[in-house]
Image (spheres, grey):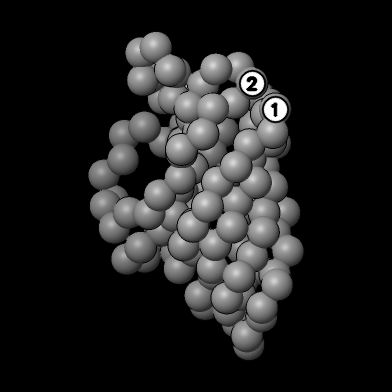
Amino acid sequence: MTLLSTGEVALIGGTASHNHPDVTADALNSQFEGVYAGFLGLLSVETLETRYFSFFEPGISLNKLSTIGMKAYLTGSAFGYYPPASGTALVCEEQGVSDCYTFLGVIDLVQ
């Protein structure tokens, strides 16, 4: 979890739940497909209302999050779905046949 320059809270995690009512219309991936998926969310620091929530492709595990201004920098792993179809800019540091053992990604959160 980290703070953006707007004062909003950015957080990452992983889920096996298909029931996330907070997915927003502008999500990179609004559908949960599979048994596990990473997610990125932005919350109001005062009310904890969701401003943004997006799943990533199944098999993507998000490990670390850092922000500078309104850009979120992510690290993680992608198993079986690399490169992801969501359009997220990712650079794979350790690549297998269809896996990326370590990636770095950046998402511009200005919307």
Q: Secondary structure at mark 2?
A: loop
Residue 5: assigned label? 2
Residue 53 in percent (x, y) is at 46, 36
Can residue 87 be spotted in the picture? Answer: no
Q: Residue at x 64, y 21 (%)?
A: 5
Pointer 2 and pointer 1: residues touching (CB < 8 Å)? Answer: yes
Q: Nearer the viewer, residue 107 or 87?
A: 107
Q: Secondary structure at mark 1?
A: loop
Residue 10 in percent (x, y) is at 50, 33
Q: Residue at x 69, y 33 (%)?
A: 68
* Amino acid beneath label 1: Gly
Disc 1: which residue: 69
Q: What is the spatial separation of the Cα atoms under label 2 and label 1, in whole angstroms?
A: 5 Å
Q: Is residue 40 above or below residue 47?
A: below
Residue 41 in percent (x, y) is at 46, 36
Q: Considering only order in the chain, which callout, 1 or 2, is on the residue closer to the N terminus?
A: 2
Residue 89 in percent (x, y) is at 72, 54
Q: Residue at x 39, y 12 (%)?
A: 46
* Amino acid beneath label 2: Ser
